[in-house]
Amino acid sequence: MLGMSIAKRLGLSIVFVSLSLVAPNAQAWDGHESIVSALQPELNHLGFPVSGYEAVLRHVGDPDNGMDANLDDSWDPLDERKWMGGTKGPTSAGFRHMYFGGWQIAHPIATFQIPIKAIGQAPERVAENATHAKHLLKAALNAESRADGFKKLGWSFHYAQDLAQPFHSVQVLTPRMIPWKELLAWPPKRGFGNLVREATRTVSNYHWAYEGYVRHRLRMADSGVLQKCLAQSKVYANLELEDVHSPKELAYAVSRASVRLGPKLGGAVIEFFGKDLMSPDYDLPNGKGHLDYSALATRADVKEHRAKLEEVTCAALANAAQATLWLAKWALR
Ligand SMILES: [Zn+2]
C-alpha cells in the first residue's frame, strides 16, 4: 500500500503512539449486564444463589463507572496509561480494561502495536478480583462477606468480558481505519500531524459505533442471533480453554482469541458502518454525529455486511460468556 510505505518513511510509530493515547474508551460491551443475564440459567445450574446472581448483575458494570479513572500514579507503576488513554478523565481507566499482548513477528499486521511489548492491566484485574472473590466465598463468614465475594466476582467477569471485545485486545484492528490520505498534505510535518489527529478520531468512531450497535442489538426484542451466541456459547466461541488453569491464564487465552478475530472484525466494521465514519462529520466520543442503530439493524442494503459483522460478534460474545462461566466455576470450586 502506498500509504503504508509513506507512513513507514515518516515513522509509523508516532501515529500509533498518539492513537493509543486517545482512542480507547473503557466501555467495551457497554452491556455487561446483558451478557450476565443471558447466562442466568447456567449460573443457577452452577449453584449461584439468587442473591449471588443479583449481586453479580448489579456490580458487573461497576468498573466502567469511574473507579478505575484518575488513579494515583502508584497504581500505574509501568506507566502504561501514557499508551492507553492518558492519566486524566474517563479514558484514563482504559489501561485496566485492555491488554495488548505484544507485537508478534509471525502476525505483523494483526498484532501491530506501540510499544511492541505487552501492555495493559486487564489480566491482573481479572486475576485479583477472581482470587479475592474465591476467598470470600469460601470463607463465607457472614452474609456481608458473601455479598462482597459476588461483587468481586462480578468485577472479574467485567474485565474478562472486556478482553473478549477485540477493540480491547488489539490496538489497531485494520490499517484500513487509518486515513492515510492525510499524509498528502504539505509540508510533510503538517500532514503527519493531521494523520495522527484524524486516525485517533476515526478509530474511536468505529470503536464507539461498534459498541453502540452491539448494545442496541442485544436489547432488541428480536435479538435472537446474538442471544443465541451467549446462550450456546460453547458452540460459537473460539476460546481455547484446555491449558487454562488460573484466572490469569484465562485472561490471556481470551485476549488471544480476540486477536484471532481482530482482522475479520476490523474489515466487517468498516464495510458495515461504511467510510462515512472517516469524514469530519463524525466524532462520536465527543458527541458529534449520529448513527441510526435501528436502521442499521434492519436495512436491506447492508444485509450481507451485517451478517458478517454479527458472525464475528457472535464468536466474541461467546468468548465473553465462556470466560464468565469459567470464572464462576473456578470461584465456586
Ligand atoms: Zn470495561
Image (tube, rainbow, N blue to C red):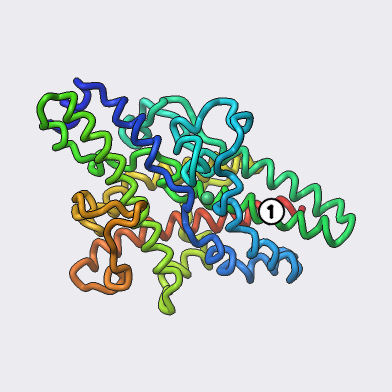
Q: Residue at 45%, 54% (x, y): give it.
A: 316
Expressed as whole percent of the image width and height from the top left, the position of residue 39 reads 59, 66
Q: Residue 301, relative to residue 83: is it above or below?
A: below
Expressed as whole percent of the image width and height from the top left, the position of residue 139 reads 87, 51
How many numbered marks have been drawn onto this rendered protein structure?
1
Instruction: Using the rendered view, name the quadrant where residue 33 is placed.
Output: bottom right
In the shown orientation, is residue 221 left or right of residue 197? right
Q: Residue at 83%, 59% (x, y): give it.
A: 144
Report if residue 107 is visible in the image.
no
Instruction: Using the rendered view, name the quadrant where residue 246 is placed.
Output: top right
- Residue 201 versus residue 138: which sits nearer the camera? 201
- Residue lying furthest bottom in this view? 221
Q: Residue at 18%, 36% (x, y): give it.
A: 180
In the shown orientation, is residue 148 left or right of residue 186? right
The amino acid pointed to by label 1 is Leu
Instruction: Using the rendered view, name the quadrant where residue 41 is placed.
Output: bottom right
Note whether ligand 1 is within 8 Å of mark 1. Answer: no
Expressed as whole percent of the image width and height from the top left, the position of residue 241 reads 57, 46
- Residue 24 versus residue 231: which sits nearer the camera? 24
Tag 1 secondary structure: helix
Q: Residue 210, relative to residue 303: is it above or below?
A: above
Report if residue 325 is visible in the image.
yes
Name the residue tied to disc 1.
Answer: 153
Expressed as whole percent of the image width and height from the top left, the position of residue 167 reads 40, 46
Q: Residue 293, relative to residue 320: is it above or below?
A: below
- Residue 232 versus residue 212: which sits nearer the camera? 212
- For the N terminus, give its image quadrant: top left
How many residues crowd around disc 1 within 10 Å: few (fewer than 14), some, or many (20 or more)? Answer: many
Q: Residue at 77%, 60% (x, y): give it.
A: 147
